[in-house]
Every structure is written in structure tokens, then in C-alpha cells.
Image (cartoon, rainbow, N blue to C red):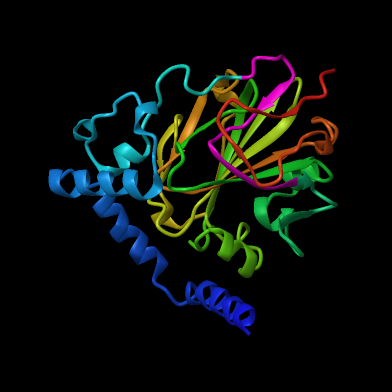
């Protein structure tokens, strides 16, 4: 009976999100998180450190007064050397700190979301050419909790090809939501960044927006504004912008999820790696490229 009640409560909590004014609340949180009022930002930072057990000593500055706002703290840079990089030539590294919640093969066009549920690659990327590139390739889903470092890095040396903003919902992407809200990643707002490497082929890093996430930034565009709510694809292939392995490419202004997509045959079979529900950090090897 207790187990059934717990299940019902979890489903109810997930369902309530459907009627919450998620965009309004996210905007409100954004204003608070960007506040430079000392009493507000210092209180929020102290609470976050205490509640989420954030290791502030890893940051370039451990002095909370040095941060202009809560978001400035949340997107803090780390000291050199605190995230060792796997420098082996064929290593594909984690782009973020977080937990690998799912990984595996994109079977035809289906990607695992949670136990007994999946979502469509076609709906996720909304681009026929991209869909065809990643059919039967490997994928990783990495959840960034509030305690994690929130900057995102490239897993392998590559050039940027395009970015594609897709508007949508702002559901929470916590464990309960993932288990109870169908196709959540293809329903939430997201920014798809596609890259090309001669050794790894095409691969994509997808920033998934979520409830209370107040913004996504990339190094080539200051802010990707969800408020405009317009689908937009920008070709960046002519920019010749190339990133070295584990170079920073962007950041979340609060916790969310990263999805990695790789072409079929370009990364090693993932059963070689013990990764399920595995905590990872930027620079840690998560797979290897099949070098030509």
C-alpha cells in the first residue's frame, strides 16, 4: 500500500508541472539569480553551498563576495588542474560534470529515456539530415545537478558546424520527471550544437532547457534567449571555429541535461565501459573514437 501511494505521489508531482506557469516562474527566478544586491546574492550562494554541498575550493575564487550575482557563482570557473583531461589521442571525454543517466545505441531512431520508455531522435533534432547521421549511433545523457560545475566543454577536437534552437516546454529534468513525463527531452526547449571531426565524424552536444534554467550561453553567442520562442538554425560552418579537446563551449545558468549524439561506427561499443548511473567530470574518458 505504501509503495502504491509513493508511486501515485511521484506521478502527481510530475503531472502538476503541466499546469504550473513554468515560463513565468523561470523568468522570476532569473531576475532573482541575476540580482546584484549583496544580501540576496550572498544569502543564495551560502544556502546553495550548504544544501548542495558544493566544493567552493575548486573554484578560481572561494570568496563569495567576489561573485556579482548568484548566476555568476553558479557558472563559476574552476582552478586549472582540478579536472584532469584524458589526453590519449582516441579518448572521448565527458563534456560536463554530472551523472550519466542513460547511454547506449540509438536503435533505428529511438533513444532510451528511462526504464521502459524512449523518445524519438526525429522529434529531438527536427532535421532529416541530422536524423540520418545519427541512426544506430551512440548516445549519452548527462544530468547536471545543482551541485555540479555548470560549464560545458567539447569532448573531442572538432569544428562547429551549426547550432539549432528548438523552442518547447520547460519541464524539470530530475529523476522523477524523466520517469513519468513521456518524451521529455524532445518536448523541452533545447539548443543543438553540431560539430565535425575528421576522426569522430559528426557529433552533437544538446543543451536541454528545464524548469528554472534561466539561460544557456555559448562562447560564440552570448545568450540563447528562450523568451523569443522561435525555432532557428544558424550555419556556422564558414566560421572555421575549431575547439581543442575539452575546450569550453558554453554554460547553463542552473542545472539541466546534456545529450551527446555520435555517428554509427565512430565510437567504440559502449559495453566496454561501466557507465550506468556513473558520476563523471569534465575530461574523464567516457568512450573512445574508432580512429581511421
Please, is residue 87 above or below residue 124 in the view? above
Q: Quadrant of residue 177?
A: bottom right
Residue 34 coordinates in the image, percent (x, y): 25, 46
| Residue bounds of the magenta highlight | 86-103
Viewer-side residue, 35 vs 6:
6
Quadrant for the C terminus, please.
top right
Q: Residue at x 40, y 21 (%)?
A: 79
Q: Is residue 265 magenta?
A: no
Please, is residue 243 above or below residue 19 in the view? above
Query: Number of labelled discs?
Result: 0
Give the residue at the far bottom of this rendering. 1
Q: Is residue 92 magenta?
A: yes
Does any portion of residue 236 appear in the rendered image? yes
Q: Residue at x 29, y 29 (%)?
A: 62
Residue 183 coordinates in the image, percent (x, y): 66, 63
Residue 166 coordinates in the image, percent (x, y): 55, 53
Q: Residue at x 43, y 47 (%)?
A: 146
Q: Residue at x 42, y 52 (%)?
A: 213
Does any portion of residue 232 appear in the rendered image? no
Would residue 160 be found to the left or right of residue 292 on screen?
left
Would residue 60 be found to the left or right of residue 96 on screen?
left
Viewer-side residue, 45 vs 172:
45
Q: Quadrant of residue 55?
A: top left
Viewer-side residue, 119 vs 38:
38
Give the residue at the far front of this rendering. 2
Please, is residue 144 above or below residue 186 in the view? above
Would residue 142 be found to the left or right of residue 289 on screen?
left
Amino acid at each position: 500500500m505504501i509503495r502504491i501511494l509513493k508511486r501515485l505521489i511521484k506521478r502527481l508531482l510530475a503531472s502538476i508541472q503541466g499546469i504550473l506557469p513554468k515560463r513565468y516562474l523561470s523568468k522570476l527566478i532569473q531576475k532573482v539569480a541575476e540580482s546584484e544586491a549583496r544580501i540576496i546574492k550572498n544569502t543564495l550562494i551560502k544556502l546553495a553551498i550548504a544544501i548542495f554541498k558544493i566544493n567552493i575550493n575548486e573554484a578560481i575564487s572561494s570568496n563569495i563576495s567576489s561573485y556579482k550575482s548568484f548566476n555568476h557563482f553558479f557558472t563559476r570557473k574552476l582552478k586549472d588542474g582540478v579536472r584532469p583531461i584524458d589526453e590519449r589521442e582516441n579518448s572521448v571525454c565527458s563534456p560536463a560534470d554530472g551523472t550519466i543517466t542513460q547511454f547506449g545505441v540509438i536503435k533505428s531512431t529511438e533513444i532510451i529515456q528511462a526504464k521502459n520508455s524512449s523518445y524519438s531522435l526525429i522529434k529531438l533534432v527536427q532535421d532529416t539530415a541530422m536524423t540520418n547521421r545519427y541512426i544506430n549511433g551512440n548516445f549519452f545523457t548527462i544530468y547536471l545537478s545543482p551541485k555540479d560545475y555548470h560549464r560545458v566543454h567539447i569532448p573531442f577536437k572538432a569544428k562547429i558546424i551549426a547550432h539549432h534552437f528548438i523552442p518547447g516546454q520547460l519541464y524539470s529534468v530530475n529523476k522523477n520527471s524523466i520517469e513519468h513525463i513521456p518524451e521529455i527531452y524532445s518536448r523541452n526547449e533545447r539548443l543543438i550544437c553540431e560539430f565535425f571531426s575528421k576522426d569522430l565524424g559528426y557529433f552533437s552536444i544538446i543543451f536541454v532547457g528545464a524548469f528554472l534554467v534561466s539561460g544557456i550561453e555559448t562562447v560564440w553567442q552570448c545568450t540563447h534567449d528562450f523568451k523569443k520562442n522561435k525555432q532557428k538554425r544558424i550555419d556556422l560552418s564558414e566560421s572555421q571555429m575549431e575547439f581543442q579537446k575539452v575546450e569550453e563551449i558554453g554554460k547553463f545558468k542552473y542545472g539541466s541535461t546534456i545529450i551527446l549524439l555520435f555517428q554509427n561506427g565512430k565510437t567504440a561499443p559502449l559495453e566496454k565501459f561501466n557507465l550506468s548511473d556513473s558520476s563523471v567530470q569534465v575530461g574523464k574518458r567516457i568512450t573512445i573514437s574508432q580512429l581511421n
